Amino acid sequence: MRASRLFGYSPLLLALAASGLARAAADDGLQLNAGLGWQHDDNLLRVPDNDPGYDGQRADSWRQLDLGATFDHLYGRQRIQASVQLSRVNFDHFSQLDYHGKDARATWFWQLGSQFEGKLGATYVELLAPYTDLRTSARNLRVQHSHFFDGAWRMHPRWRARVGYQEDRYSYELTSQRPNNRREQALEAGLDYLPPGGSEIGVMVRRLEGRYVYLRPFALALDDFAQDEYRVRVNWLASAKTTVKLLAGWTARTQDAFGPGRVSGVTGRLSVAYAPTAKTSVDAAIWRDFAPIESSVVSYTLNRGASVAVGWQASAKVRVDASSAFEQRDYSARNALPAALARIDLDDTLRSTALNLRYTPSRKVQIGVNLSKQVRSGSRALGIGAFSSTSVGINAGFVF
């Protein structure tokens, strides 16, 4: 870790800390937090099996310094939440990946009378994009700007109407990834029935449109798309210990860069949260949906997956969480693809497992240890092979 780079960043961190502490004295809604972390990955850049890696190196370790502030305050019926997080990440070997991370979020949870409520907000996130589907040792920062609004009208004690809008903009530092630069706009509307007991049953329609900035390789066209969703939404409090959530229905997607490009089918997600005791929890989910992919060849996949997570509050200060997920990604969702790609199997799978131990010696200090593993079967069409990676780390967080 290059100390000069880290110390060069310290004046900004100290200035933010001083400002945050001064304001915290005047308003209990503001808190300052800091964190330190170390992580090691035996295949940082997701190099395929039997490949020696870049510079003959596959593994690397990195250190991360975080400093941020959170604000949460209620003004009458209006609630304001905001947070800012700055990070400095330094790698031991692949020093070209060193970067400053930024995460800023603000949300106004508004309420007018007893019938109208919703939220208005924006986010800005800048971080290192994952290398799961990217073959390079160069740095690739991803910037995401988002803003959103939703509102609900309680027209009747048992009925609620909802509308929402969200816009996301993505941009990538690496030239080869710029075909993924895009703007996504989503508009939705829904109607919910609210039976006694706190459950919710509703229907919703959603229109999602994507606009790309650069031509996608092999397509020689912009990969703009439009997606229409018609879904049922259920939040069922089955018992004091079990909650079932369902968002599923029919999706039609049009993306013409590779030909007709129109696909449709059943999509959605079903999740179950079960808390057998006050100290244990089990969360499981299955899904089938379209998802973006950070690839230079294709821009989205049709994913089918399942996950399970188990939590155990071992004591008042110790918590253990374990999770496992499986996902099959289908790249051949379009009706038309170049002949060279159409002859190749366009599926692969991702498997991931994680184990986290969290120790909270006091209300303002938290120490964590994590172990995770990721395995991909690979896809020749995208030029990515099978790989596996194992990561281990330790971190400490402080609240002032």
Image (cartoon, rainbow, N blue to C red):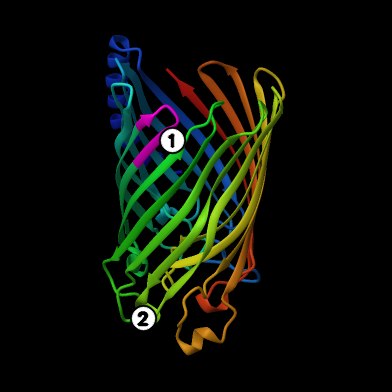
- Chief secondary structure of the magenta span? strand
Residue at mark 1: 65
Q: Quadrant of the C terminus?
A: top left
Residue 370, given in percent of the width and then of the height, sits at: 63, 39
Name the spot of residue 272 as percent of width and height, x first: 64, 41
The residue carrying mark 2 is 219
Residue 97 falls inside the magenta stretch: no
Q: Is residue 371 left or right of residue 223?
A: right
Q: Which badge, 2 or 1, is on the more N-terminal residue?
A: 1
Q: Is residue 258 left or right of residue 348?
A: left
Q: Secondary structure at mark 1?
A: strand
Image-based side of 100 in relation to 65, left or right: left
Disc 2 secondary structure class: loop
Near mark 1 (Cα within 10 A), the count class, few <14, some 14-19 or many ≥20, is: many
Residue visible at 54% across and 26% down in the picture? 196
Which segment did they paint magenta?
154-162
- The residue type indicated by label 2 comes to Ala
| Residue 2 seen in the current view | no
Quadrant of the image occupied by residue 242: top right
Vertical order, 71 against 384 (above or below): above
Mark 2 or mark 1, whichever is nearer to me? 2
The image position of residue 168, as x and y in percent, is 32, 51
Tag count: 2
Q: Nearer the viewer, residue 291 or 24?
A: 291
Considering depth in this image, is 70 or 203 the residue closer to the camera? 203
